[in-house]
Image (spheres, rainbow, N blue to C red):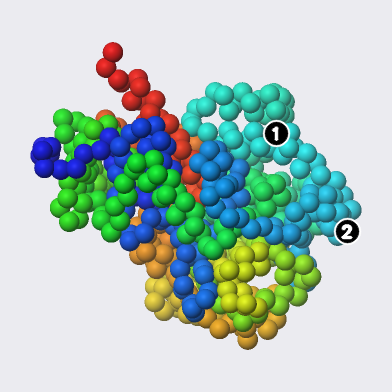
Amino acid sequence: MMDCASMETADAIVIGAGPNGLVAAALLARAGWSVTVVERADVPGGAVRSAALTLPGYVHDPCAAFFGILHACPPFRALGLDARVAWASFPIPQAALVDPDTGALCHADPERTALALAAAAPADGAVWRALWGWWERAGRALLAAMVAPIPSLGASLRLLRAGGLGGSLRTARTLLEPVETLATRLLEGAGARALLASGATHTDLAVDQAGSVPQALVLAMVGQDQGMPVPVGGAATIAEALAALVREAGGRIVTGSAVTRVAIERGRAAGVVTNDGERLRARRAVVADVGAVALARDLVGEEHLPRTFVAEIARFRHGSGVFKLDLALDGPAPWRLDGLERCGVVHLTGDLETMARSAFEVRRGLLPARPLLVVGQQSVADPTRAPVGCHTLWVEMQAPTRPRGDAGGQIPGGSWDAARQPFAERVLDLLDAHAPGLRERVVGLAVRAPTDIAAENPNLVGGDVNAGTSALDHQGPFRPAAGWARHAMPLRGLYLCSAATHPGGGVHGMGGWNCARRVLRDARRLRPG
């Protein structure tokens, strides 16, 4: 039982100030609720932050870095992030390379993209135009339905109207197939195929796995539609804007304080207890921007939850980890392929066979012999990220949480302590093959293995930045557990808004947006009278 007379009380307590927690807090505070956000880190933002990881004057984004999906989702304009944050964009948003001399570039203008693809394989230009036409006609409605609550009649009807019954059924079938199948069926050029499939490298799914189409197709089309926008000054400016929204609406954000327990009173979530012994009471709701397993097992306690829910949460799986390099350069990356010096995100994927093999190796716990690199060049569009004439590189790839061996047969497995530096050298060799002389331009380097990323942020279990596998059995109505995909947890007054719930990983704020709207609907429904 909580002592109500001696503690702070708010309508809602939000656990965690990641982007979803801040979006939820902002919406609740704007609705007139008193809101307190409790964050274990010293600054709000979670995985949306910036840091001087290498040398003074270089600004790096340790985790999230590109925000096209955010631009395409409701919180962006509804919360004024389009005006509160200064944005920069690229003339060539993204590219995919099969080898150092072969690739495909996505230009900001869809017609230029089509013409460039047609130069390598004549039929591919028409295919890209058809894909873009589908996106304008029905694809945006598909994205809206994908991020809407489960179920969402309005979003589903809009999608059906946009695509028609036959078109919607064909789209549904396409979404269930491997992206390797889709790319091979539609496109002729190896570069064009890699460009369409490259979005899969942002997840733990391989291109030859069912369900790899949605992420790849949406990222390809959002990249064409929105570009790869970056916030001027670093990702932290987004977190700062969201925190300001909460405070301006009357909310309170407490940093440097970790919630250790959800207080339960008469079968409902009544507040939280922090690591320094502070007790905060919630009149109406506790909203958690934390992992689903951590919420159930550590903060609530399985003894307070239905056995069916506990059994479902026990099945929750995390995806592979992320290995990360942040580079400070004394000049631009010397790419061999023309145009990449103006590109936002360069995917070093190899062909579809290479992509499938590398992902398989990661799934089996092996260091990939040929890692699939996602290379961000924020400083190309935002010169505030580095000293004059200098640049940053943001390099990310899927890797096993704990390597049990090396597919290349050269690096000892067992732990990242032994593998971290030799695997970083493998990545640098691959970068140098595509940008000869890059090593000579590196003046600062930060290397982080999945275990390092997990230690920085407990929500990123095992270095899984998507807060749960992207496999089909963990999407939609199954995320975080079958029967509990609409944010309300099986304890009255308790809600989950993190990326562990639908619609999953990525900085779009929809977990917080959908959750807050559910909280407000429940409050109206349960209001006396």
Which residue sits at x=16%, y=34%?
265
Q: Nearer the viewer, residue 432 or 28?
A: 28
Q: Amino acid at mark 1?
A: Ala
Q: Position of residue 1 (x, y in %)?
A: 10, 37
Residue named by callout 2: 119
Instruction: Name the outermost residue toward the bottom.
Output: 440
Contact between marks 1 and 2 (CB within 8 A): the answer is no
* Image mark for residue 529: none
Quarter assignment of residue 206: bottom right
> Mark 1 or mark 2, which has the lower sequence index?
2
Q: Could you tell whether 177 is left or right of 25 in the image?
A: right
As drawn, 100 above or below 257? below
Residue named by callout 1: 138
Local secondary structure at mark 2 = helix
As drawn, 65 above or below 19? below
Q: Could you tell whether 456 is left or right of 348 in the image?
A: left
Local secondary structure at mark 1 = helix
Q: Position of residue 506 (x, y in %)?
A: 51, 50
Which residue sits at x=46%, y=73%?
53
Which residue sits at x=54%, y=47%?
81
Dot 1: few (<14), some (14–19), or many (≥20) neighbours within 10 Å? many
Task: Please indicate, yes or no, whether residue 224 appears anywhere in the rendered image.
Answer: yes
Q: Could you tell whether 268 is left or right of 78 in the image?
A: left
Mark 1–mark 2 Cα distance, whole angstroms, equals: 27 Å
As drawn, 255 above or below 152? below
